[in-house]
Amino acid sequence: MSVEVLKSSGYTSKCDIWSIGCIFYQMIHGKTPWSAKSEYELVQSIMNKPLTFDENIGEDTKDFLRKVLQPKEENRICWDDVFKHPIFIGYFDSYID
């Protein structure tokens, strides 16, 4: 869950972008981006620990994950930027137009 959902604060569709980032990260790494024993610890971990990547992860993939897993919703990319990101070149052309 995104930080804004964990904190029960207002949120937008960007929390779905966060969720996609978590799922994508877990598919690639076989683990969640952050772990904790409580929701409070999880929020603290997300806010204070940078993402880590396996050494075989490409730069475009790292860039995408960093942009979708921004703890502050206002810093997270929007749906248009998700569709235009280099890792999806050619996949969402009909949505971009």
Image (cartoon, rainbow, N blue to C red):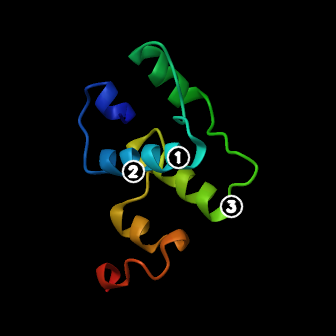
The residue located at (26%, 51%) in the rendering is: 13
Specify few, some or many for label 3: CA neighbours under 10 Å numbering under 14, 14-19, or 20 or more: few
Kindly identify which residue carries mark 3: 58
Whether residue 58 sits left or right of residue 33 in the image: it is right
Residue 6 falls in image quadrant: top left
Residue type at the position of mark 1: Tyr
Image: 48 above or below 36? below
Q: Residue furthest right?
A: 55
Q: Earlier in the sequence, mark 1 or mark 2?
A: 2
Image: 30 above or below 58? above
Residue 64 falls in image quadrant: bottom right
Residue type at the position of mark 3: Gly
Q: Earlier in the sequence, mark 2 or mark 3?
A: 2
Choose between 11 and 25: the one closer to the eye: 25
Residue 53 falls in image quadrant: top right
Residue type at the position of mark 2: Ile
Q: Mark 3 and mark 2 in contact (Cβ < 8 Å)?
A: no
Kindly identify which residue carries mark 2: 20
Where residue 65 appears, as percent x and y from the top left, is: 54, 52
Which label belongs to residue 25?
1
Question: Which quadrant is the C terminus positioned in?
Answer: bottom left
Where residue 46 appears, as percent x and y from the top left, is: 51, 30
Where residue 24 appears, as percent x and y from the top left, is: 48, 50
Whether residue 13 sits left or right of residue 29 in the image: it is left
Question: Which quadrant is the N terminus positioned in?
Answer: top left
Specify few, some or many for label 1: CA neighbours under 10 Å numbering under 14, 14-19, or 20 or more: many
Where residue 56 appears, as percent x and y from the top left, is: 73, 54
The answer for how far apart the CA atoms under marks 1 and 2 are is 8 Å
Q: Mark 1 and mark 3 in contact (Cβ < 8 Å)?
A: no
Image: 44 above or below 26? above
Disc 3 on helix, strand or loop? loop
